[in-house]
Image (spheres, grey):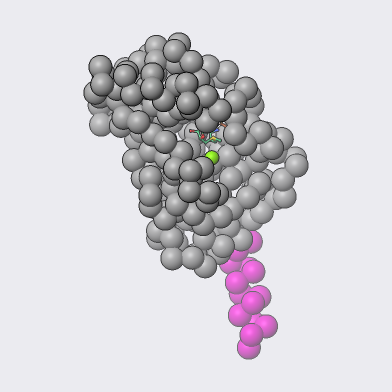
Amino acid sequence: MDFVNLEMKTTTSTLYNTQMLPVMEHFYTIQGEGVHQGKAAYFIRLGGCDVGCVWCDVKDSWEAGRHPLRSIDFLVNEVTKTPSQIVVITGGEPLMHDLTELTKALKAAGLRTHMETSGSSPLSGTWDWITVSPKKFKAPLLEVLQHASELKVVVFNKSDFDWAEKHAVLVPPSCKLFLQPEWGKREAVTPLIIDYIKDHPQWQLSLQIHKYINVP
Ligand SMILES: C[S@@+](CC[C@H](N)C(=O)[O-])C[C@H]1O[C@@H](n2cnc3c(N)ncnc32)[C@H](O)[C@@H]1O
Ligand SMILES: Nc1nc2[nH]cc(C(=O)O)c2c(=O)[nH]1
Ligand code: SF4
Ligand SMILES: [Mg+2]
């Protein structure tokens, strides 16, 4: 009987979720950034990025071929072993992959789908929340900015405030606006961000709290 059940499950998964994606890591943690900071969330970090930010805090993700291919069924199963209600698809640059089937399967499992993206590749997938973090190294596409739930600009130097404003006019009126210190420059840029927000109160500060509390 067990054998029959196993066979049925395998057949179903090959019928619906044949797609494989390169996965660097997947982990259950606390969302450390933006509007959903502090909430439990399951992260799936996809391999592959063609943006090349000099200060990227996850450069090992860039080469897709270095990461094992995982099936959508496997990923949904891993998430649903936890009580998490939110799954965050990040990378790497997740939009380098077609995320239609992955998000369809996650939503079918009752999960809320969030994504962290630079917005530099075409939009795919069904999303409850899209965080766009625009990069000078490969600018975001208008079609992604127009679907942003939050805009999160990393501040590495003073010129990033202009970069932030340039994109703030391209997102929907409901989009939340965040400035996040580049981690390596946080001591120098956090005071600049505080002054900027006091003068431009439509912006909010986003800190990477997971790095302060030592969780992934
Ligand atoms: C590693 S990226 C992956 C998702 C996507 N490629 C992107 O850049 O949005 C996840 C988030 O971390 C931010 N980030 C990356 N390196 C950072 C750093 N050194 N300091 C602060 N934020 C950083 C990105 O801007 C993005 O909001
Ligand atoms: N805890 C935690 N929160 C995060 N928010 C965005 C992250 C990312 O790398 O996309 C991230 C991450 O890597 N860890
Ligand atoms: S776009 Fe994201 S993953 Fe790619 S280099 Fe920049 S911060 Fe890193
Ligand atoms: Mg991170």
Seen from this angle, which residue lies furthest bottom? 1
At a point 44% along the width and 12% down the height, the residue shown is: 158
182 sits to left or right of 69: left
What is the x, y in percent for residue 63?
71, 35
Q: Residue at x 63, y 50 (%)?
A: 25
Residue 155's x, y, as percent?
46, 22
Picture quadrant of residue 167: top left
Tell which of 191 and 45 is nearer to you: 191
Give above or below for 169 relative to 79: above
Q: Residue at x 58, y 57 (%)?
A: 75
Does residue 46 sit above or below 156 in this rendering?
below
175 over 196 or under it: above or below: below
Q: Is residue 124 left or right of residue 147?
A: right
Q: Main structural element of the magenta stretch: helix, strand or loop?
A: helix
Image: magenta residue range? 1-15
Residue 39 is at least partly visible in this image: yes
Pinpoint residue 93: horizontal percent, then vertical percent.
58, 34
Q: Is residue 12 magenta?
A: yes
Where residue 146 sits, quadrant-wise, is top left
* x and y percentages locating residue 154 in the rendered image: 46, 25
